[in-house]
Amino acid sequence: MRTKLLKFGMPLMAFLLAIVFAFATNSKPVSEDMALVPGYIMQNGKCKVERQCSTIRGPLCVVGGVTLKTKINETHCGSDLFHWNNEF
């Protein structure tokens, strides 16, 4: 009985573990991980939306020499945003 269980069970367990590890190591393409957010600049005391930028680190998102930022509220812009590239 015990050898019958081992002869059938061990290959089955190895196959099931291979399936589990195959799905566990599957990663998403970089483009799915990109978080696109609107980029703002401070203009006349208010945050004005300019264009879409990314939160993923890279080259800074710049328009006219000004780095675009996140929006905290109407009168405060937050942290720097980064340029995104849709060629992934």
Image (tube, rainbow, N blue to C red):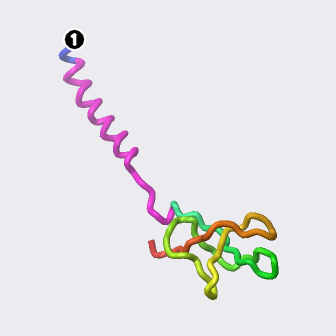
- Residue located 54% across and 64% down the image: 34
84 versus 6 height, above or below: below
For image coordinates 40% across by 44% down, the residue present is 24
Q: Quadrant of the C terminus?
A: bottom left
Quarter of the image where one finds residue 2:
top left
Q: Position of residue 51 (x, y in %)?
A: 66, 78
Report the number of numbered marks.
1
Classify mark 1: residues with Cα within 10 Å, few (<14), some (14-19) or many (20+). few
Answer with left or right where residue 20 lies relative to residue 12: right
Residue type (three-letter) at the residue carrying disc 1: Met
Q: Which residue, as the protein is rendered here, is positioned at the far bottom?
A: 64
Q: Magenta stretch: residue 6 in it? A: yes
- Where disc 1 sits, the SS reads loop
Q: Which residue is label 1 attached to? A: 1
In the displayed structure image, the side of residue 42 where residue 61 appears, left or right? left
Query: Which percent across, then down, holds residue 80?
Result: 61, 70
Report the magenta residues as a range. 5-32
Question: Where does the image place residue 32, in percent across and percent down from the top left?
Answer: 51, 62
